[in-house]
Amino acid sequence: MTAEYPTHSEYADFLEATRVSYDAIASAYADRFSDWRADSSPLDRSLVSAFAELAGEHAPAPVADLGSGPGSVTAHLHALGTPVFGVDLSPRMVALARRAHPELRFHVGSMTALDLPDETLGGILALYSLIHVPDDHLPGTFAEFHRVLRPGAPVLLAFQSGDSEDRLHLSERFGQEIALDYHWRTPDHVIAHLLDAGLRLYARTVREPDGEEKRPRAFLLAEKPLAGGR
């Protein structure tokens, strides 16, 4: 894997801003989102379970949880019997995940440039981490997904749905100064990029806002086609 603390020149500006921001809020974020199963809806959990079952067809090839944060989703997949490891931009977040889940592997890295050999993953999960990737970096990010996935392996994406030109910039969260951009997109917008990267759409689901949520939540399940198509 890459070095634990890459230099600034190794990051695009948006990656550096995201890394620094999540380093600043890592402890508070981990306290707030330490139990994904308790915070998630039954539909969310069922979709992750479906993903885990599909990824299980490619075991022992591991699944990568991209944007793994404090590691609670990674731990949930592990509990389902999925061979899984986490990847996150924030070294502080990775350190907290390792402390909370010492039996699992967590690495510092970026979904835009995965330090993995071709066709080695049995699945990719990215829950609410794609929202920090600008549109012009989506083609390269999904090309990376296609490169590292085994043929037939699944991808599950979750993101807040909204107009594709909508963006939120936060300069403060959990009482810390940050510089974090959030990009809202329609499912069709993301699907177009997935298809352009050579991935195949398997299913789409949109869950309406619930509780404190302000936007619909979109879930896209895709896969890397088998040789010769499917």
Image (cartoon, helix red, strand yellow):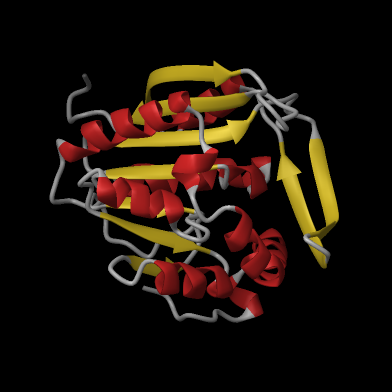
Q: Is residue 179 left or right of residue 20?
A: right
Left or right: where does residue 26 sit relative to residue 78? Answer: right
Instruction: State the residue at coordinates (37%, 27%).
Output: 46
In this rendered view, identify the residue nearer to me: 159 or 48.
48
Where on the picture, by quarter, is residue 14?
A: bottom right
| Up/down of 158 relative to 17, above or below | above
Front-lying residue, 82 or 4:
82
Percent coordinates x, y for residue 8 in the rendering: 65, 77
- Residue 84 in picture, x, y percent from top left: 28, 54
Q: Position of residue 71 (x, y in %)?
A: 44, 58
Q: How many marks?
A: 0
**Residue 153 visible within the image:** no
**Residue, far front:** 38
Q: Residue shown at 35%/47% (left/top)?
A: 76
Question: Does 225 sit above or below residue 131?
Answer: above
Q: Quadrant of the N terminus?
A: bottom left
Reply above or below: 210 against 101.
above
Which of these two is toward me, 122 or 34?
Answer: 34
Work out whether residue 150 or residue 82 is closer to the camera in this orientation and state it.
82
Which residue corresponds to the image point at 48% horizontal and 46% vertical from the top-left? 36
Q: Is residue 155 visible?
A: yes
Quarter of the picture containing the C terminus is: top left
In the shown orientation, is residue 62 left or right of residue 76?
left
Give above or below for 161 relative to 26.
above
